[in-house]
Image (spheres, helix red, strand yellow):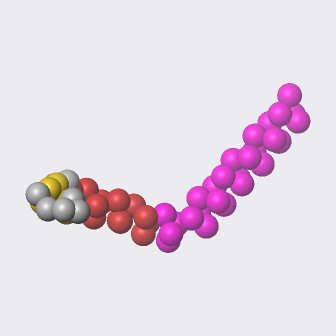
């Protein structure tokens, strides 16, 4: 992140992302998009895991 402080009254500070910050932000956005697209699959996998775990516990 880049911080640019201006010597004015009232004080003013501008912030912006550096190139590295923009790259990181794109990676976070990509993960968010993937999560939105695959959340139903994640939920199904979680449910299947919980059901299998419950079945194993009852069998023991």
Image coordinates of residue 44 in percent, x first then y, are: 66, 60
Question: In the image, is 54 to the left or to the right of 7?
Answer: right
**Over which residues does the magenta segment extend?**
35-60
Residue 34: % across, % down: 43, 66
Quadrant showing the N terminus: bottom left
Left or right: 48, with 15 as reference point: right
Task: Identify the residue at image location x=66%, y=52%.
Answer: 46
Q: Nearer the viewer, residue 2 or 27?
A: 2
Indicate whether 50 appears above or below 43.
Answer: above
Q: Is residue 53 positioned above or below 46 on the image?
A: above
Q: Tell me the chief SS of the magenta region.
A: helix
Q: Residue at x 83, y 33 (%)?
A: 57
Residue at the image position 83 percent from the left and 42 percent from the top? 55
Judged from this view, the residue extending furthest toward the right is 58
Kindly indicate the quadrant of the structure image that contains residue 10: bottom left
Question: Percent position (x, y) of residue 28?
Answer: 35, 59
Closer to us: 54 or 22: 22
């Amino acid at each position: 992140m880049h911080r640019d402080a201006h010597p004015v009254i009232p004080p003013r500070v501008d912030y912006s992302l550096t190139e590295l910050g923009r790259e990181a932000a794109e990676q976070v956005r990509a993960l968010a998009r993937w999560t939105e697209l695959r959340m139903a699959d994640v939920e199904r996998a979680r449910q299947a895991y919980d059901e299998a775990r419950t079945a194993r516990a009852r069998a023991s």
